[in-house]
Image (spheres, rainbow, N blue to C red):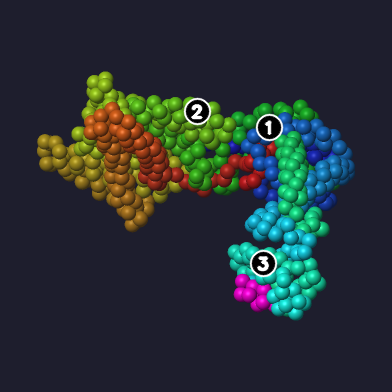
Amino acid sequence: MIRSMMRLSVWGVRSRRQEIISELFSLGVLHLDEMEGGFRGDDGTLNELRLLRGRVLGLVEALGWDQWDGLKDSDVDQAVQLFSDLPPEEFVPEISKSLEKFSTRLTNLQEGLARDEDTAAKLKKSLDLLSRFSAFFQRWSDSSRESFITLWWISPEKIAPFLAAVQNDLLSRGREDFGGIDHHFVPGREGPGILSLRVPQALASGISAIAVREKALPWRLPECCDQEAPAASIPSLKAFVDELEIHIHSIKSDLSENSEEWGPRLAGLFLFLDEKTEQAAVEARIETSDNFFVLSGWIPRDFLLATEDTLKTKFGKDILMKCRLPGKDEWKDVPTSLKNRPVFAPFEIFLKLLRPPSYTGFDPTTAVAVFFPFFSGIMIGDIGYGIIIFLLSLGLKRAKRPVLRDVGSILLIVSLWSVLWGAVWGEFFGDIGHRLFHLRPLWLERSEGVLPVMIFTIALGAAHVVLGLLIGIWQGIKNRHAHVWIEKSGNLIILGSLFGFLFLLMSEFPRGLFSIPVSFLVIGLALLIAGGGIGGIIEALGSIGNIISYVRIAAIGLSSAILALVASKFLDVFGLSILGVFLALMIHLLNFILAVAGSGLHSARLHYVEFFGKFYSDGGKNYTPFQRRSGSSWKK
């Protein structure tokens, strides 16, 4: 149901403004009015808090910590205990000072890690390249005194001219005895590759000039071993890489420990600063005079007395409160807060996909809690599948995330209806129950009694749509919207007259009785046109289509039953072989997934379109009390 809300105005002594706002924040029940205008009372503290909050969030993200859903209130309370007693003028500087040392250490660690990883990547690349020349190096390892090996960046098309120039230089120096030029080329992925060249020691001074002329660039070893020859540098490079890997692992371990230790602390500090920022924003916006301030908002009626008692006890004569019911002209501004019994509350999740109902509207949570699992159970309609859903729901109800616990509660009720309707249809993993336990349907088998099932689902649809129209009529009367209840009444009367026609056609009543539904049809049309004009007639035709669309309940259930029978047929064909059992299990798994997903989606669709369309007014505002945000809700 929609909670009754009260308008609460609070006047307080200006000197205790911060304390009163902080207490209202701790109580977390007052939905403050949207405040227009700038931050009239801001002395710069608000901007400082925002900057500090952003800095803390930056540190949290730099740590790579993202366990907001697991954050405990104790983590926030720890920050409150450390910093809440600081004088206002020391609050921001003291926290900034506390963060500075940690921020510097974290920055040094991360910069060192980035530097080492970059160096290690370069060394590995060099090592990989040199290893591709290792056979070439080993072949000429014994001739290192009379020759040396150089490495060059060069384009493939420049290799031949470069080698020819080197050979000519050798001939000009009278080194015919040296023999041919030995080389090995490793092509690059794109563009230049690396050329390894063995030349005599006498050519050491001239080869650089040749390389410049032929547009070749020297390939140099990393700084750690640039004094060694390429062939001799491979062991040194391996040693440096191993040393860097150990150091990188050490830094990562240090960062991981910092993340585990400081992540929750900084996240708690962030939420604490977020609270202080929210309070400072409210403090800067509220109306103030020389001696007092005033703020107003909406509070659920069931929280009002406890809130007044708490504030009066703590602030005594320094605070004055006034409450009243909302006026008719304020209904559009009143936030909507839902309160349902624990068994129905999980079904509020369906309304979170829509804008909340208006304050004067109707909360359909109870109706959804009754009909959604009922429709889903009819579509699934299998005792075996119901048992599996029941076990899944028990697991989800133990989950940490509230939304998963809500889904678990919904599936629990769906599972019970699935088992019940499985007994009605006589299905336990298809016809396995009949084969093993001689299970008989309490009513009929879906695969054989298609027409009765279709008639039954249409009757369900008619009842569901009529309920929606009755709720719409009640809303129109309650809110004094004459055109609404007149149109809904006309729609309801037309549906009743059409069902009357069908009843008389299928019975043996005298034909003169047809005048009764005709009369009601005329009355319904008159009300439709009076309440909604031509659009009302279209709405009535739409209601007929809405009722017919409930046939999908029978269709989806029938497809599920047939697919389960197909799974059993594989056992008939292949027997209790590995292949037969495997195929049967796969078909049942597919059918189970389709049954659960299909029943949920189509049951939800019947509510959103066919049912809600008859009464739901989504013009409400979410009830967002002035309070601490938990988990990852700050991201919203």
Q: Main secondary structure of the magenta part?
A: helix
Mark toward the start of the polypeptide (1 vs 2): 1
The location of residue 566, given as percent across then percent down, is 26, 36
Q: Can see residue 162?
A: no
> Is 91 positioned to the left or the right of 573 in the image?
right
Check disc 1 and report the residue beneath it: 72
Q: How far apart in space, not on screen, are marks 3 and 2 (Cα)?
A: 71 Å
Check disc 3 and report the residue beneath it: 182
Q: Are marks 1 and 2 in contact (CB under 8 Å)?
A: no
Magenta includes 161? yes
Amino acid type of the residue that numbered disc 2 sits on in the rendered structure: Gly
- For the record, the magenta segment spans 156-165
The location of residue 415, given as percent across then percent down, is 40, 28
Residue drawn at (30%, 51%) of the image? 541
Q: How far apart in space, not on screen, are marks 3 and 1 (Cα)?
A: 70 Å
Check disc 2 and report the residue beneath it: 395
Magenta includes 148? no
Mark toward the start of the polypeptide (3 vs 1): 1
| Residue 300 falls in image quadrant | top right
